[in-house]
Image: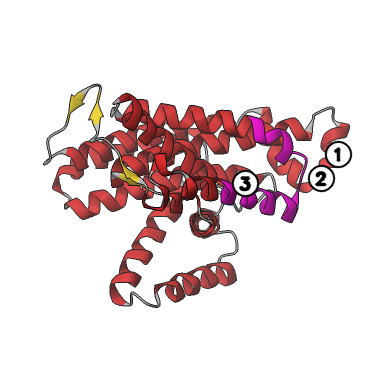
Amino acid sequence: MSRDRTARILGIVLLAVVVAGPLLPQWTMFLLTIAIAKGLVALGLMLLLRAGLLSFGQALYYCIGAYAAGAIGRFFNIGDMLLQMITGALVAALVAFVLGFLLARYRGIFFGLLSLALSMILYGLLVKNEALGSTDGFNILRSTVFGIRLRESSIRYVVLLTGCSVAFLATLLVNRYLKTPLGQLAPAIKDNEIRVEYMGTSVRNAIHVIYVVAAVLSGIGGALAATTVGHIDPDMAYWTTSGEFIFMAILAGTGSVVAPFLGALIFGIIHTVAYDLSPNTWQMTLGTALLLVIVFLPDGLWSLFRRRKAA
């Protein structure tokens, strides 16, 4: 997909949210905002997948972003949405920069399991930390935008619009990043690292950069999810949360920067409908959907658009 077309699609979606958002019921706006938050995490996973890396612990940065957003409200009385997302992104970037020196040395299942272990370490620390609510977590401050406190009737719409705008900007930046030499290097790293090294490029440094970018996106998504739900807890770092993000990334595919948001939205719809119809077996429905995609659309749902274009 060309850059211009990507920008056009994102612009149309943002315009649709601005125009149709106030007409949507509250639960729909909530579902869309959570899909955007999780889509940002899946977008980071897409970058890793393009380089041949699969992280089983991306919930680490999702949780860090959420707790960073909650912490500045709890300890500094800051409830501004944009500041919360910026804080979540910065803290996630700092942690990823440090851990990236270790993770950039590993590939395959070792990379995935090490990322999972780090996520579960954070989960264990949060469960034991009474200052942050232990297993119950804690509520975050009511959202404001540029210091303006929102009315109860409009808070869902404003949160959706703000989250969509931030995701719009982040996705455009990622799309631009993929057009750079470093962004185009990812498929080559996946295919043959040795040849990339012979070209004079450090694979370890490139993976380190990709890992930090993915963490920043996850941190923003975690902060947005915390603002939307109004509550955070250690389960945001649990391995099942990372599994959901992998589900979204595989469901959508890596064909476009728009695909992760489509995967997150479809995941949210399937999860909501399946849980409503069968609360005890909704996982079976999700598993069946993923199995069908893997068998019939191994490149993800976005490959349907590619096939149509090719036809």
Q: What kind of secondary structure does the magenta stretch mostly adopt?
A: helix
Q: Are marks 1 and 2 in contact (CB under 8 Å)?
A: yes
Q: Amino acid at mark 1?
A: Arg
Q: What's the amino acid at mark 3?
A: Leu
Q: Quadrant of residue 73?
A: top left
Tell me the CA gap for discs 3 and 2.
27 Å
Question: What residue is disc 3 on?
Answer: 118
Residue at left 43%, top 27%? 87
- Counting from the top left corner in percent of width and height, residue 90 is at 49, 27
The secondary structure type at the circle numbered 3 is helix
Q: Mark 3 against mark 2, which lies toward the viewer? A: 3
Q: Which residues are magenta?
A: 98-121
Place of residue 105 in the rendered image (x, y in percent of width and height, measured from the top left): 78, 40
Depth check, front residue: 228 or 123: 123
Q: Nearer the viewer, residue 8 or 234?
A: 234
Assess disc 2: are there few (<14), some (14-19) or many (≥20) residues with their C-alpha within 10 Å of its C-alpha. few
Q: Is residue 210 above or below residue 299?
A: above
Marks 1 and 2 sit apart, C-alpha to C-alpha, by 6 Å
| Residue for badge 2 | 192
Q: Position of residue 283 (x, y in %)?
A: 44, 72
Which of the marked residues, 1 or 3, is nearer the chain's N terminus? 3
Residue occupying the point 86% across, 39% down: 195
Camera-nearest label, 1 or 3: 3
Q: Residue at x 39, y 38 (%)?
A: 223
Residue 183 in view: no
**In the displayed structure image, the side of residue 143 where residue 52 appears, left or right:** right
Q: Position of residue 33 (x, y in %)?
A: 31, 46
Q: Nearer the viewer, residue 118 or 195?
A: 118
Q: Secondary structure at mark 2?
A: loop
Protein image colouring: secondary structure
Which disc is residue 195 wearing? 1
Q: Nearer the viewer, residue 44 or 233?
A: 233
